[in-house]
Image: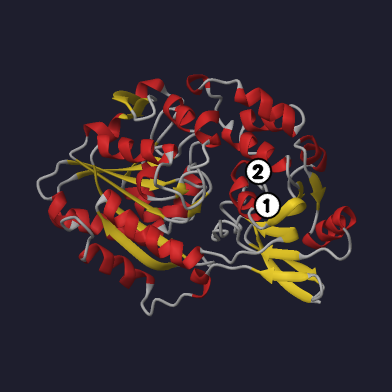
């Protein structure tokens, strides 16, 4: 019997699989990657040798109003490490600069002060100007024309009215934007609900090029890049993280060139083998990405890439913060996967409902696979209404899966489904 630890909330849950059933355990090479330098050294080295850009302190010289975009409470950006270094660089270029830290929320709820203190540390919260993007406050946004898809581009006015706009984030495979990081700080990060919704429309999500690892021709990515260029995002710092959420690589400089360098690193480190199982067990890598069900399709999509048609996916997701959105909950519980897909397919891009992309992807996967959700925080009745099978532990879920596909089932385990790219 093999014991495998599955990330869950702030710890792990044990999964026990008989050796005869275990087809493979798939992990990202990055989780074992040793950069040979400390996290701080990696960040400072990236800033000292930016890709396709002048150093940040030179860009800051003479700039009066600077906006620094960072991620919200749903992302594992190591801002306690990176923000002080970025602020130090900016003030080295202009000690008197008026700097605002803008938290990119997309359509997520606002980040609380308690969460900010956990993410940034007390010193930054007590001494820096922090603004939280609220996609549902029209007065906070300005219209900046249309994007390549025809979507209207409404962006937070702080990004338009500053002299220097920069962003920090981290890069990982993303199941419809290709990869996270870079341009995503702008769209969806600091855009209005109308712009985010249209970027995540049924038509865009349904594109075969809106997929993990795909950037070329990806309509969602192309709108994101256009948005970030439109507001003159001059500099980014993006990092790569291992399974402990530690920085193992850093990339700084031009919006597209630095991001491309990070993508190349992540692609090489995250590419998984080509194989297939009857049962696939995965997670969203624990907190913060497993805090609600709304975030969970990331790993479920990875699992689908390793699961045979008609097989079972076991998703371990704490959902400590519940479902994650009222629209998502309403849509994912409105009927069968077929009924959900049919309903969403009739919604024009400009009438996209907030969060509808999530039930769309779930419906697509649920039409091909049973999903067992391991959660000790979410009501089992609600899980059933969401077209999934509830379980309280990975072992309980595996026993249920064997009942569905047979005791001889081949089991593939992807402990952190967000960090792996299935071979396509």
Q: Quadrant of the N terminus?
A: bottom right
- Occupied quadrant, residue 395: bottom right
- Residue 10 placed where, x, y %? 62, 60
User: What residue is shown with label 1?
Assistant: 317
- Residue 273 placed where, x, y %? 58, 67
- Occupied quadrant, residue 139: top left
Relative height, residue 218 to residue 52 (above, below) = above
Compared across the picture, whether 183 is left or right of 328 comes to left
- Residue 274 placed where, x, y %? 61, 64
Q: Earlier in the sequence, mark 1 or mark 2?
A: 2
User: What residue is shown with label 2?
Assistant: 293
Q: Are marks 1 and 2 in contact (CB under 8 Å)?
A: yes
Dot 1 alpha-carbon crowd within 10 angstroms: few under 14, some 14 to 19, many 20 or more: many
Instruction: Classify mark 1: helix, strand or loop.
Output: loop
Q: Residue at x 37, y 75 (%)?
A: 38
Instruction: Classify mark 2: helix, strand or loop.
Output: helix
Q: Nearer the viewer, residue 154 or 128?
A: 154
Relative height, residue 206 to residue 73 (above, below) = above
């Amino acid at each position: 019997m093999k014991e495998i630890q599955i990330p869950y909330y702030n710890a792990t849950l044990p999964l026990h699989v008989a050796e005869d059933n275990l087809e493979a355990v798939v992990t990202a090479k990055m989780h074992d990657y040793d950069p040979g330098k400390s996290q701080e050294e990696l960040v400072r080295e990236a800033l000292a040798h930016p890709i396709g850009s002048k150093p940040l302190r030179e860009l800051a010289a003479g700039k009066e109003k600077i906006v620094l975009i960072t991620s919200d409470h749903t992302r594992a950006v190591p801002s306690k490490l990176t923000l002080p270094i970025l602020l130090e660089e900016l003030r080295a270029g202009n000690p008197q600069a008026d700097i605002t830290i803008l938290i990119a929320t997309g359509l997520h709820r606002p980040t609380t002060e308690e969460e900010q203190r956990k993410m940034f540390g007390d010193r930054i919260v007590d001494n820096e100007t922090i603004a939280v993007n609220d996609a549902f406050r029209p007065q906070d946004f300005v219209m900046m024309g249309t994007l390549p898809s025809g979507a209207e581009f409404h962006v937070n006015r702080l990004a338009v009215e500053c002299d220097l706009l920069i962003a920090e984030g981290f890069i990982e495979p993303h199941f419809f934007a290709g990869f996270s990081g870079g341009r995503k700080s702008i769209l969806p990060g600091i855009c209005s609900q109308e712009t985010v919704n249209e970027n995540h429309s049924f038509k865009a999500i349904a594109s075969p090029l809106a997929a993990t690892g795909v950037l070329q021709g990806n309509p969602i990515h192309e709108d994101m890049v256009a948005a970030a260029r439109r507001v003159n995002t001059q500099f980014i710092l993006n990092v790569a993280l291992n399974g402990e959420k530690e920085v193992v690589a850093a990339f700084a400089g031009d919006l597209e060139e630095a991001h491309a360098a990070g993508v190349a690193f992540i692609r090489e480190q995250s590419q998984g083998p080509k194989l297939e199982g009857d049962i696939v067990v995965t997670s969203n890598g624990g907190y913060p990405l497993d805090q609600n069900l709304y975030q969970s399709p990331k790993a479920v999509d990875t699992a689908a890439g390793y699961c045979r048609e008609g097989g079972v996916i076991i998703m371990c997701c704490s959902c400590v913060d519940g479902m994650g959105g009222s629209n998502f909950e309403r849509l994912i519980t409105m009927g069968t996967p077929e009924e959900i897909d049919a309903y969403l397919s009739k919604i024009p891009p400009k009438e996209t409902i907030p969060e509808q992309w999530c039930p769309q992807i779930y419906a697509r996967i649920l039409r091909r696979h049973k999903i067992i959700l391991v959660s000790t925080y979410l009501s089992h009745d609600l899980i059933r209404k969401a077209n999934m099978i509830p379980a309280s532990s990975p072992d309980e879920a595996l026993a249920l899966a064997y009942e569905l596909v047979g005791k001889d089932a081949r089991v593939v385990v992807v402990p952190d489904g967000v960090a792996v790219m299935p071979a396509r």
